[in-house]
């Protein structure tokens, strides 16, 4: 019977501690690449400026406007009576009279890729409060004839409007444009014989054209404000009076200046 005797070596505590340190260090070095791959270090994102979108002028809009008018209107009556009316009435803060007007309009604009804007609109305007003579945007003249003696003739606007197109260019949130088209007004004429108060007050339509320039600013989504200057000219119109001034004919109606502040239904629709 053969026996094998194997030698055992007993090591001390210091040797055991040294071996443990060596083993743990080797394990950490082996796992370090994997740990570095698993752990992603956050990077600092670079600041980007906000993107500002230029205003899109395409869409339907509804607006309200305020304005002030001035100008003159000529009249004549056969055989040789003629005069001119100054339509610019003085403002009175106590009763609100003056050559003011206000109104509404509706229109549509379409912006091309090169930011040229094409549009069309319809508007109507109504004058402010009349003065003591019953005039808002209007005027009065006094004359005398052998047939009726001393008399007065006046004209005042009851309402007016335009149908016009516009074309402009829109850099960013601004729009610079020209406008023009058809214009109309509905007026009341008053002829009064001052001696006895006999009065005739016919109504008449006057048709003409309008042209102007404007600038508009989009200061918030769906909100714009604009200022425009309009020159309006109406053609001659005649009306038969009931007492002896057979007819009157009126020409050259006022240019208008309007400050319009409006809200656009589109372009977000």
Image (cartoon, grey):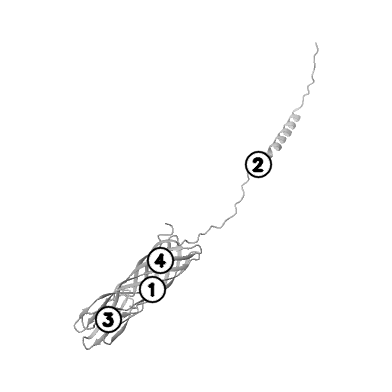
Q: Is residue 20 above or below residue 114?
A: above
**Cα gap from disc 2 to disc 4, whole angstroms:** 65 Å
**Cα gap from disc 1 to disc 2, whole angstroms:** 76 Å
Foreground of the two, 85 or 92: 85
Dot label at residue 220: none
Q: Earlier in the sequence, mark 3 or mark 4?
A: 4
Q: Residue at x 38, y 73 (%)?
A: 210
Residue picked out by circle 1: 210
Quarter of the view holding residue 128: bottom left
Residue picked out by circle 2: 37
* Label 1 secondary element: strand
* Label 3 secondary element: strand
Residue picked out by circle 4: 120
Q: Earlier in the sequence, mark 2 or mark 4?
A: 2
Where, quadrant-wise, is the C terminus in this rendering?
bottom left
Task: Give the crowd class for mark 1: few <14, some 14-19, many >=20 residues within 10 Å.
Answer: many
**Cα gap from disc 3 to disc 1, whole angstroms:** 24 Å
Circles 2 and 3 in contact, beta carbons < 8 Å: no
Say which of marks 1 and 2 sits in front. Answer: 1
Say which of marks 2 and 4 sits in front. Answer: 4
Dot label at residue 248: 3
* Label 2 secondary element: helix
Q: Earlier in the sequence, mark 3 or mark 1?
A: 1
């Amino acid at each position: 019977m053969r026996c094998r005797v194997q030698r055992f070596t007993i090591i001390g505590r210091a040797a055991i501690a040294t071996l443990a340190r060596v083993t743990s260090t080797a394990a950490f070095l082996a796992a370090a690449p994997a740990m570095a791959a698993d752990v992603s270090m956050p990077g600092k994102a670079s600041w980007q400026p906000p993107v500002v979108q230029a205003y899109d002028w395409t869409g339907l809009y509804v607006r309200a406007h305020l304005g002030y008018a001035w100008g003159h209107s000529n009249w004549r009556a056969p055989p040789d009576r003629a005069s001119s009316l100054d339509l610019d009435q003085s403002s009175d803060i106590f009763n609100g009279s003056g050559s003011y007007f206000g109104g509404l309009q509706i229109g549509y604009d379409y912006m091309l890729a090169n930011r040229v804007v094409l549009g069309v609109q319809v508007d109507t305007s109504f004058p402010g409060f009349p003065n003591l003579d019953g005039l808002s945007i209007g005027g009065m003249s006094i004359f005398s004839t052998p047939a009726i003696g001393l008399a007065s003739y006046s004209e005042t606007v009851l309402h007016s409007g335009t149908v016009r197109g516009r074309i402009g260019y829109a850099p960013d949130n601004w729009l610079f444009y020209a406008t023009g088209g058809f214009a109309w007004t509905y007026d009341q004429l008053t002829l009064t014989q001052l001696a006895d108060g006999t009065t005739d007050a016919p109504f008449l339509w006057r048709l003409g054209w309008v042209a102007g320039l404007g600038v508009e600013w989009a200061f918030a989504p769906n909100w714009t404000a604009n200022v425009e200057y309009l020159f309006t000219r109406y053609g001659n119109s005649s009306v038969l009076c009931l007492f002896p001034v057979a007819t009157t004919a009126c020409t050259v109606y006022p240019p208008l200046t309007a400050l319009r502040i409006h809200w656009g239904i589109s372009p977000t629709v």
